[in-house]
Image (cartoon, rainbow, N blue to C red):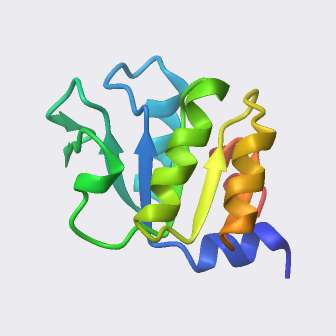
Amino acid sequence: MSHFKKLFESTKTIAVVGLSNNPERASYRVSAYMLSQGYQIIPVNPFADEILGQKVFAQLSEIPFKIDLVNVFRTAQDCPAITQESVAIGAKSIWIQLGIISPESELLARNAGLEFVMDRCLKIEHQQL
């Protein structure tokens, strides 16, 4: 079984940090797709109340239930702090979107025992399975 297949099968809840309410943005399109595939999407954006019909949280620590995967649509310099917050809330995995490289985040995640993927698109990888 492929690594991604196992990851997708064990994931039910996806917190999306930096989810935009603009349908033109990749974060919106990827999240809309994952929602259509049966995943629970939890938007994390301090500047919105609702995105894709889902209640938005200002930060990961405000989400009152378990998160399986944190999908990050923020700049590389924001990733280490988001990774630390993901570890603190007990997320199982972190996925940093295509084009974003953060070796520091990878080290933090792996040292905490989290699955870690970076510089890949969640939607593209899911569609290939």
How many marks overall? 0
At a point 69% along the width and 74% down the height, the residue shown is 113
Residue 117 seen in this snapshot:
yes
- Residue 19, horizontal then vertical, whole percent: 40, 33
Q: Please state which of residues 97 and 51 is positioned toward the viewer in this rendering.
A: 97
As displayed, is residue 87 above or below residue 100?
below
Q: Please state which of residues 96 and 85 is positioned toward the viewer in this rendering.
A: 85
At a point 63% along the width and 25% down the height, the residue shown is 77
As displayed, is residue 42 above or below residue 129?
above
- Residue 8, horizontal then vertical, whole percent: 63, 70
Residue 77 falls left or right of residue 57: right
Residue 38 falls left or right of residue 46: right
Residue 32 seen in this snapshot:
no
Q: Please state which of residues 53 and 111 is positioned toward the viewer in this rendering.
A: 111
As displayed, is residue 25 above or below residue 112?
above
Q: Please state which of residues 79 and 32 is positioned toward the viewer in this rendering.
A: 79
Which corner quadrant of the image does residue 126 belong to?
bottom right
As displayed, is residue 113 above or below residue 126?
below
- Image quadrant containing the C terminus: bottom right
Residue 6 falls left or right of residue 18: right
At a point 66% along the width and 37% down the height, the residue shown is 97
- Image quadrant containing the N terminus: bottom right
Which corner quadrant of the image does residue 128 belong to?
bottom right
Q: Residue furthest right?
A: 2
- Residue 102, horizontal then vertical, whole percent: 75, 36
